[in-house]
Image (spheres, grey):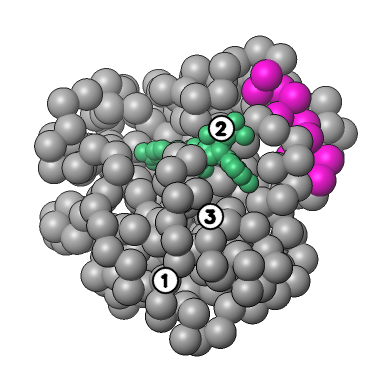
Amino acid sequence: MLTESTILHNGVKMPWLGFGTFRIESGEITKNAVLEALRIGYRHIDTAKVYENEKSVGEAIKESGIPREDIFLTTKVWNTDQGYEETLKAFNKSLEKLGTDYLDLYLIHWPKDKNIETWKALEKLYKEKKIRAIGVSNFKIHHLEELFKETEIIPMVNQVECHPQFPQNELKAFCVKHKIQLEAWGPLMQGKIFDKTLIKELAQKYQKTIAQIALRWQIQRGVVVIPKSITPSRIKENSEIFDFTLSNEDMELINSLEGDRIGPDPDKITF
Ligand code: NDP
């Protein structure tokens, strides 16, 4: 079922499958893509201030007629808005653009120098019940450990690059230990997954598509996924991952694929 959910460490339900909106142009393109996802049954949308499409995401949610409380909505505080006061301001701007008075999940988009102050602002907003869950993105183990030392609340989610070529096994184990839900961005390797021979073979074996194998592998290993597509047939295809199970052997085979990240290393970002 498309709304199958994980339960975060504070008891909030988060659907395993969400809809990503990175690089979707604001305006009609975003609005139509989000409306299509909601029509098909997605109830979890991921955006960010820096995607510049929060307004269109908000419009789609309104236009869908689906009650706001039935949708799990995530946005993120951008790097240049880090800091206590700056984050509080950025949060209000995001709410305004999204046309909502609360968020389901607010994430620190990338680890930067002001993680601690930024996190304290998120804690304040969480305690005021303006956000149902707070989390981080692109945090490595050392970033999380630094945060633990100086703040009160353990993040509920860590959204990181994660796909068969970069399964994040060590970080995943660390997150499981601390009850932090791992969430995969780029679960289709931003379109590059389609050349992987093993995934192609498994797609044949299970009579599913390459995208469905890659997404199913994630939810089966306990990782939330947020594939992005502006193509209606793919939006539907990516949602059809709850009607089959990969065998333990095939899960292991995918786990053993080797490679590296395709996106920036969080310790080396310059933006
Ligand atoms: P994805 O791995 O979701 O790949 C998206 C690409 O795959 C698009 O080109 C899309 O094409 C294509 N695609 C989608 N479904 C299919 C399919 N079934 N068959 C063939 N091609 C397909 O990459 P993203 O980077 O978008 O990651 C997902 C989401 O994660 C983002 O949208 C964003 O919300 C979040 N994210 C977060 C980051 C962070 O730093 N926290 C960084 C990057 C992403 P098309 O649209 O043309 O159909």
Examine the rendering and report whether any part of residue 13 can be seen.
no
Give the mark, 3 or 1, whose residue is nearer the N terminus.
3
Is 39 magenta? The answer is yes
| Cα distance between the residues tagged 1 and 2 | 26 Å
At label 2, the amino acid type is Thr
The answer to whether the beta carbon of the residue marked 1 is less than 8 Å from any atom of ligand 1 is no
Tell me the residue at 65%/30% (across/down).
Answer: 230
User: In this view, which residue lies farthest toward the right?
Assistant: 65
Picture coordinates of residue 63, whole percent (x, y): 83, 26
Tag 3 secondary structure: strand
Question: In terms of sequence position, does the residue under pointer 1 or pointer 2 come before the other?
Answer: 2
Q: CA distance from mark 2 to mark 3?
A: 12 Å
Q: Count residues near mark 3 (Cα–Cα under 10 Å), then give few for <14, some for 14-19, many for 20+.
A: many
Q: Nearer the viewer, residue 23 or 259?
A: 259
Instruction: Residue under label 2, please give it.
Output: 21
Checking the image for residue 225, the label placed there is 3
Q: Which residue appears at 47% of the width and 86% of the height?
A: 249
Q: In terms of image quadrants, where is residue 165?
A: bottom left
Q: Is residue 190 magenta?
A: no
Q: Which residues are magenta?
A: 29-40
Secondary structure mostly seen in magenta is helix
Q: Label 1, on which residue?
A: 254
Q: Quadrant of residue 204?
A: bottom right
- Ligand 1 has an atom within 8 Å of the beta carbon of the residue at disc 2: yes
Indicate the secondary structure of the residue bearing disc 2: loop
**x%, y% of residue 9?**
47, 68
Residue furthest top as drawn: 27
